């Protein structure tokens, strides 16, 4: 949907299924009803997620043409894709394997290139006949606990190898733009315990690795000046601002955007999502009540990293909720947990959501637009505590209606 602040859709990683037939069946079941409820008189936007297997199938001309016809017949369009989960994302233990294969591998490169080829065909034109820009979000290079992260040589190796593979995709984007006149960008998504976790880490990677390596390579590949190569990199590689992820790390939206602006870096899209948070009271009974409330959200499918704020202001990071529950002590004054809870709910009893961060992001967008792509990304409906599970289509509708009120 095209709203005052940009294009809005929901990320279809919410639906199970790993082959294209399953993906397409889920879209056919959910989207017509959602469009009728949310955007009956205007095109309905989709944030498409397809697995690696499904992407291979969708790229086949007969499938891609059939999908284009279906989009046109239903007055829908794809403006962004989620290329983070490569394989199974539902009804299996995902945990850290959501990063597999990571950006050290050619498999990740080929999958991402394929998504961009598909997106270059699916991207519509606007009412003025101009092509809409599109992005593919992706993992923050890898998962840091797979490596000896405290060793500078290990970090340098990982950053160098992953950056080289990212630049292979950038070169593909330059070629696709020449062939199709479509501007597309790769949107790296920092998340807890990713190789890139914070805004500062994104900026450091961009300035210390991506720019120096990329300027040298793109200048030679495409006969660009250093200034043109730098501008090309900044155009084709951007940040995916997942509101949940930055909130878990206690990073304020205004601070993140100010840092990016200082370095001339861009946001490709916003994933509208909320995390869990709670402050611990001083009394023993109250603290235990909060701890038990977090424990209700402990489930075996996804990683639920926790960042604890201590009395001294230090941030302690735990790889998963069970680790935080085991380490809980009197020094912890607040927890924030990576659990994508429904964005339209702000209060979970003694727990709260980071919904205010979404409000801040949307207000900052209204004050000075920094992207035009917004994607609701609550994918945990199947693993929510029983009292929070409701019909999936109804839930998506409530998510998008909650965002629409800010337009």
Image (tube, rainbow, N blue to C red):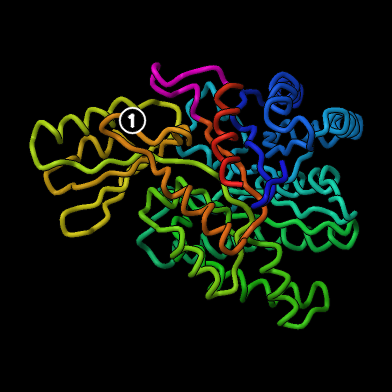
- In-image side of 106 versus 239 (left or right): right
Looking at the image, residue 295 lies above or below residue 46: above
Residue beneath the point at 31% across and 25% down: 296
Secondary element at image label 1: strand
Report x, y in % for residue 195.
Answer: 47, 55
At x 73% / y 39%, what residue is drawn? 45
Q: Where is residue 216 drawn, in percent x and y?
A: 69, 77
- Image coordinates of residue 345 in percent, x first then y, are 43, 33
Percent of width and height locating residue 180: 89, 56
| Residue drawn 38% across the image and 48% down it | 248
- Find residue 64 and report its image quarter: top right
Q: Which residue is mark 1?
A: 348
Figure check: 326 above or below 171: above
- Residue 28 figure quarter: top right
Name the side, left or right, on which 317 lies relative to 62: left
Q: Nearer the viewer, residue 36 or 186?
A: 36
User: Would residue 386 be counted in the magenta stretch?
Assistant: yes
| Near-viewer residue (332 or 225) | 332
The reply, left or right, for residue 360 in relation to residue 216 is left
Q: What is the crowding at mark 1: few (fewer than 14 residues within 10 Å), some, or many (at least 20)?
A: some
Residue 232's place in the image compared with 170, above or below, is below
Q: Which residues are magenta?
A: 380-392
Q: Quadrant of residue 352?
A: top left
- Residue that appears at 16% across and 55% down: 311
Magenta highlight on residue 153: no
Residue 112 or 372: which is nearer the viewer? 372
Q: Residue 193 or 105: which is nearer the viewer?
A: 193
């Amino acid at each position: 949907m095209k709203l005052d602040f940009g294009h809005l859709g929901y990320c279809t990683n919410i639906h199970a299924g790993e082959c294209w037939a399953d993906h397409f069946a889920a879209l056919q079941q959910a989207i017509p009803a959602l469009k009728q409820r949310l955007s009956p008189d205007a095109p309905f936007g989709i944030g498409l997620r397809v697995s690696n297997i499904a992407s291979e199938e969708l790229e086949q001309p007969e499938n891609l043409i059939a999908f284009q016809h279906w989009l046109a017949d239903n007055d829908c369009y794809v403006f962004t894709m989620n290329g983070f989960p490569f394989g199974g994302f539902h009804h299996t233990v995902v945990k850290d394997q959501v990063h597999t294969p990571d950006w050290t591998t050619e498999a990740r490169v080929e999958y991402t290139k394929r998504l961009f080829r598909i997106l270059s065909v699916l991207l519509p034109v606007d009412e003025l006949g101009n092509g809409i820009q599109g992005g593919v979000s992706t993992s923050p290079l890898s998962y840091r606990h797979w490596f000896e992260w405290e060793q500078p040589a290990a970090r340098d190796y990982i950053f160098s190898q992953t950056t080289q593979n990212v630049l292979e995709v950038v070169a593909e984007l330059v070629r696709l733009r020449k062939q199709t006149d479509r501007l597309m960008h790769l949107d790296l998504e920092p998340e807890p315990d990713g190789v890139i976790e914070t805004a500062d880490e994104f900026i450091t990677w961009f300035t210390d690795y991506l720019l120096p390596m990329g300027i040298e390579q793109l200048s030679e590949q495409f006969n660009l000046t250093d200034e043109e190569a730098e501008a090309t990199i900044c155009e084709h590689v951007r940040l995916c601002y997942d509101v949940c992820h930055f909130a878990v790390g206690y990073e304020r939206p205004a601070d993140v955007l100010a840092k990016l602006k200082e370095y001339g870096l861009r946001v490709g899209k916003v994933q509208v999502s909320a995390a869990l948070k709670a402050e611990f009271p001083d009394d023993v009974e109250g603290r235990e009540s909060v701890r038990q409330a977090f424990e209700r959200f402990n489930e075996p499918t996804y990683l639920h990293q926790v960042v604890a704020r201590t009395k001294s202001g230090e941030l302690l990071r735990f790889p998963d909720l069970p680790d935080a529950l085991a380490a809980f002590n009197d020094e912890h004054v607040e927890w924030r947990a990576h659990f994508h809870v429904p964005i339209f709910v702000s209060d979970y009893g003694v727990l709260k959501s980071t919904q205010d961060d979404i409000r801040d992001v949307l207000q900052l967008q209204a004050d000075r637009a920094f992207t035009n792509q917004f994607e609701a990304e609550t994918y945990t409906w199947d693993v929510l505590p029983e009292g929070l599970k409701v019909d999936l289509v109804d839930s998506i509708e409530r998510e998008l209606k909650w965002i629409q009120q800010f337009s």
